[in-house]
Image (cartoon, rainbow, N blue to C red):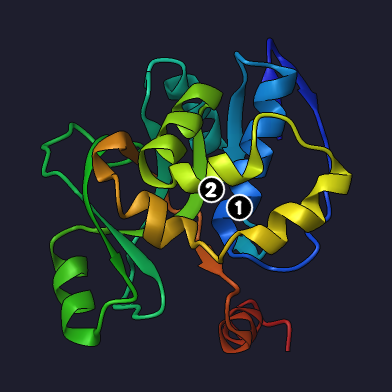
Amino acid sequence: MIRSNGLMSQAYYRQPFSRGTAPAIALAVLEIMGRDPDSTIAFFPSDHHYRENSIFQATIDRGLQLATICGDRVLIIGAPATYKEVEYGWIQPRPIVPISRLNALQYVSRFWEKPNLVEARALQKSGCLWNTFVMIGSGHAFLRLLEATVPHLLAAIGDRFSASDLDRIYLEIKPIDFSKEVLAAAPERLLVLCDGPSGWTDFGSPQRAMDLLQALSVF
């Protein structure tokens, strides 16, 4: 999604094969910045579900407002952890005492990628959040985050590219995971916004999707 001066437009590229999440995100950021250097960018994974869409929409609206004052930091939506999930990534915010924890904006202290059960129990108890991978920020904030963590990826892509260049680019780069090699590598460049009770679920596993369908009495 591209948002600039209240307008939205779309561009599509087809990845020739998988090289992880970082190359796809970098290509999107560079394409958007080429069209509008003052854009605000939001990334939404396609395999997620929200039980209460209106609550999630309110969080996104708040995030888009806050992105204009976040400067060089990228804002990530964190979901309240309702149980000890070991297959999600977790975000450890810096401790604060907000008036209301709902939609609280915090600095990020650390990322935990798929912790074990003991760690997940401790993370939930300490108020850590699930990483939804929904991200909002200025194009400049995303670009500087990439420059600080994976400059070799930006160098491989180059300043200008077209759809016909993607085969060559993807042959030259190695797989890069955005969560592990970008977000976890530079928590000081991030902020986390706590979602409301939207019922966020990641459909990364078939069983999780089936569990949700059963909870919704579809079967």
Q: Position of residue 52 (x, y in %)?
A: 58, 53
- Determine whether 63 is above or below 213 in the image: above
Mark 2 or 1: in front is 2
Q: Position of residue 51 (x, y in %)?
A: 59, 60
Q: Earlier in the sequence, mark 2 or mark 1?
A: 1
The residue under label 2 is 153
Q: Is residue 49 left or right of residue 113?
A: right
Give the residue at x 56% y 82%: 208
Give the residue at x 65% y 24%: 33
Kindly tell me whether residue 41 is visible in this rendering: yes
The residue under label 1 is 23
- Name the outermost residue toward the right: 164
Comparing 170 with 9, the one in front is 170
- Name the kind of residue labelled 1 in the image: Pro
- Determine whether 186 is above or below 167 in the image: above
Using a 10 Å C-alpha cutoff, classify the residue at mark 2 as few (fewer than 14 neighbours), some (14 to 19) or many (20 or more).
many
